[in-house]
Amino acid sequence: MSKALLYDATMCIGCKQCEGACAQHNQLPYDDKIAAESVQSDHKYTVVLTKDDKFMRRLCMHCEHPACASVCPVGAFHKTKEGPVVYDVWKCIGCRYCMAACAFSQPKYEWGSLNPRVRKCIMCPDRVVAGKPTACAEICPTGATKFGEREELITEARERIRQNPTTYLDRIYGLHEVGGTCVLILSSAKVEEYGYPSSEKIGDTPMPEYTGRVMDRVPDFIPVWALVLGGIYWISHRREEVAAAEGAGAGNEKKNGSGR
Amino acid sequence: MKIKVTFWRAVFLVIMVLGLYSTYVRYLHGLGAVSNMSDQFPWGFWIGFDCLCGVMLAAGGFCIVGAVYLFNVESLHSVVRPAVLTAFLGYLLFIVGLLFDLGRPWFIWHQLVYMNPHSVMFEVGMCVMAYTTVLFFEFLPNVLERFHLTAPIKWIHKIYPVLIVLGILLSTLHQSSLGSLYLIMPSKLHPFWYTPALPFFFFGSAIAVGLAMTIFESTQSAKAMGRHLELPVLIQLGGALLVALWVNALLRFEDFFHRGMLGQIIKPSYEAYFLWLELLLAFVIPITLLSFKKVRLSPSGLYLASVIALLGFITNRLNVSLIGFETYVGHHYVPKWTEFSVTLMIIAMGFFLFAVAVKYLPIFPEEKPALAQLQQVGSRTMVGTPVLTHAGD
């Protein structure tokens, strides 16, 4: 049972209070200038986008099977049982594979820092563990961002679509995408128009499976390949020894030559 | 001591000065100041060239060692030492490149502590670490021989079968895994280059490049040292290269065919131009060239074909790592001059170290002009020589 966020774009009024609350909780600067920035960055984990008078929030999706956690060579990311995908900065070596691998391009980097960290929404794990909603959900004046149990939020989202089929697109973004995420999105406009990758493109397969298919074979591959290589080495050198012995014993140089 | 100013020494100096300036920018102003990498392009030229191409260009070590020691191709014996030297330097410089690219290089050792066995990067890191150690031991006899230390050479000679098998095993793993790195980006990497066969292609191209690189460096060092070129060896390598290129080309074709890409790759598009360039340089031109017996038997022909093939596979890796992401990101990534400058500095260091090693170590022992003098100096050298002839390989 993991926690999740349901973001209903039709209820969002674009007040950006979630941005401010997020910045405050994560001790990031927030002013009018930053509020006007329409891209996520190392100092802006979530952003409210506007297009044709409709709003859309972007934030880390907190995948059920996060790519960032699977690719990190030092395991700096992990999925908590409560739902948030969190980051242990002290482990990070700065390879940025998480950024390259994330289908939603959520991890951002402190490019200007001399000891840079990966930055992304970590779903207020301290609050979530304490049973409180995330900072963004708590401050949301309209309930557009709602915090709760993932299963319950899915049921609720389905109910909203059923009651207002003309308002909503018949789709919960995040339900199946890359194997399911802990951020679920309801909207009247396509999320793809706000920079989200299309469901067809990212598919339902959990991202770690793409590399897992190969990595799972490595433990079997190593002994088998080592044996094959060792075998080839042994055979080719054995042949040499035999040839040398035969050459020495019988003095048959012709056979010695063809032994190669 | 007088140092003559030559053209190449001047170029080297300029590269080093610019490189050191870029190094200063990198470590005192950060990755953002030194590169055009961004949140959209978290991996830039250093990953694309220094890492992906660097490891590929160092593949000659395991290819030649495998041919000579696993398959008893005795005739290639004379190129084992230069190939191992290139590989050893290549991996050392790859690690240097990594220290530039990693955001927190001072924590590189975390790989050994906080291991994540699911990560392809972890596998690559461990293999590279282990293989560099193997290469160190494969290279060490050169140094020991130089100082006439026969006892340790014998020890290394004893563990040689283990080193050889381990080296090839580790190379198979990480050469292919560099391709596996990109398997997790199916929605980002352009379908021309994203294929489940990436690890196979990275391994296959490493073998072709290993052969081409051995031809390149043999010719280059022969020219630089005024050595006599061993034509039969080059011809043999050229033949193997032709086969390797054909195998790679057919596998690529099969992959395009299998994925129904053939219709798309012939249509002009931004990605198609780069793909054509890659296929032309890696396959079409060198295969055509090497199909002529005249080219296969001439040192300059072999050299030309190898260099073109090398450029082709370099284009391939840059396509996979940079060009293939531009459509997804929506804008171009052009490296900053400081990124090129760091890479150039690392390459220049490679050439410099190779020249130094060749000058002071018995890399090409049979033709070393100094050998005649050494033999006169004392019988001490001669005692060691029979044991050493093969130990260093």
Image: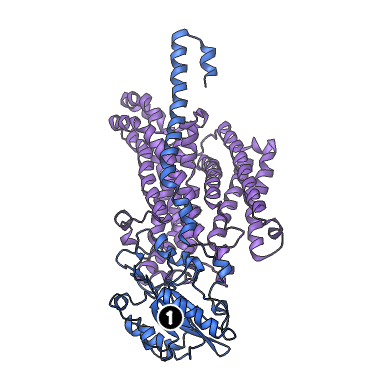
Chain colours: A blue, B purple
Q: Position of residue A193 (x, y in %)?
A: 57, 79
**At x 50% / y 34%, what residue is drawn?**
B67
Q: Nearer the viewer, residue B292 or A48?
A: A48
Q: Position of residue B382 (x, y in %)?
A: 35, 24
Q: Which residue is mark 1?
A: A46
Circle 1: element type? loop
Q: Nearer the viewer, residue A3 or B123?
A: A3
Q: Is residue B11 visible?
A: no
Chain containing the residue with disc 1 = A
**What residue type is disc 1 on?**
Thr
Looking at the image, residue B149 sits to the left or right of residue A158; the answer is left
User: Is residue B274 placed above or below B75 in the rendered structure?
Assistant: below
**At x 47% / y 17%, what residue is drawn?**
A243
Q: Is residue A51 visible?
A: yes
Q: Which quadrant, please, contains the C terminus of chain B?
A: top left
Q: Residue furthest top?
A: A250
Looking at the image, residue A101 sits to the left or right of residue A165; the answer is left
